[in-house]
Every structure is written in structure tokens, then in C-alpha cells.
Image: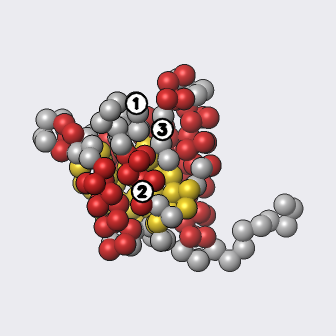
Amino acid sequence: MIRVGILTVSDKGSRGERVDTTSVAIKETLDSSLYSVEYIKIVPDEIDDIKCELIKLCDEMKLDLVLTNGGTGFSKRDVTPEATMAVIEKLVPGIPEAMRAKSLEITPKAMLSRAVAGIRKETLIINLPGSPKGAVENLNIVLPALKHGIEILKGEASECARKDD
């Protein structure tokens, strides 16, 4: 079972001025026979708040996967990628590259995403868009590779190469 945390980054959501439907959409997208969502929280668009939550989820809770949503655009308050970059130890550029490439087939606005993905200890962190539609579309792009990547990260995958590679 892959243990998951969902972190919504939203000033309005953290103040109770907006209902968080994105974390619900993300949770519903994850196959419950493979993924166990163990943590959902909303924090404001503040680098220190985001960093503290990410560190807690990786270092204390030792979750396998953290999916953030929100704060990846051009607004002055959008700081999720900066907070993520401050806590990760390794970049995983292929994940946001794939999300942007596939999303460009849907909307040219996809090129405006500043989302990042990376590893802290044995946790994979992925920044998703803040809208339910965008978050689910992007999550569905990377889901086929996540189980294998997390198995490698946790030392559970013994062989990565196929014989025909």
C-alpha cells in the first residue's frame, strides 16, 4: 500500500473562504486498493508553512507520496514550487515535464505551470495544479509510473531493466 498525503495550498481555503474540492478529487482519483490517503490539510500560500508541512509528511510521517495542489502559477502568492525545492534532496524533472507536455494538448496555458517534483528521503513530492480538473488530469498522466517509482525509492523493486531494453 502506498501511503499518501495531500496538501492543498490556498490562502482562501486556509481561511475557510473557499471549499477545498481539489483534495477530494485527487483522493477519488487514487485507486484505494493501491493508495491509502493518510493525511489531508490546507495551508496558506506561505513558504514556511508549506515547507513545515512537507518536512512533517516526509520526515515524521514517512509517507511514500505527497501530492500538493495549488500555488504553481504566476501569482505573487504562488510559492509551492519554491517551498518544494527548498526541502527536496533530488529533482525528478520527468514528472512535471510529462504533465506539462500532455497538458499542452489540452490547453496552451499548461506551459505556464511552474510545478516541480522531487524526493526527500523516501518520499516523492509532486506539485499539481490547484483546480480539481487540472489536478486530476495531471495526476492521471503520471499515475502509470508512480507505483514503480515508489517501489524503487523504497528499495522494493529488484529489477528495473527489462530484457528487451
| Mark carried by residue 114 | 3
The percent coordinates of residue 142 (x first, y second) are 56, 48
Task: Determine which of the numbered discs, if any, sits on residue 74 in the image.
Answer: 1
Dot 2 alpha-carbon crowd within 10 angstroms: few under 14, some 14 to 19, many 20 or more? few
Quickly name the residue at label 2: 86
The amino acid type of the residue labelled 3 equals Arg
The kind of residue tagged 2 is Ala
**Secondary structure under badge 2?**
helix
Q: Mark 3 and mark 1 in contact? Answer it, CB < 8 Å.
A: yes
Residue at x-position 32% and y-position 74% = 60
Above or below: residue 61 compared with residue 131: below
Q: Residues within 10 Å of mark 1 (few under 14, many from 20)?
A: few
Q: Earlier in the sequence, mark 2 or mark 3?
A: 2
Q: Kindly tell me whether residue 24 is visible in this rendering.
A: no
Which of pointers 2 and 3 indicates the residue nearer the eye?
A: 2
Mark pair 2, 3: CA separation:
15 Å
Q: Quadrant of the N terminus?
A: bottom left
Give the residue at x 60% y 34%.
Answer: 102
Secondary element under disc 3, as helix, strand or loop, is loop
| Residue under the point 35% across and 65% down | 55
Q: Report if residue 63 is visible in the image.
A: yes
Taking the image as shown, residue 49 lies to the left or right of residue 98, namely: left
Q: Nearer the viewer, residue 153 or 106?
A: 153
Toward the viewer: 108 or 142?
108
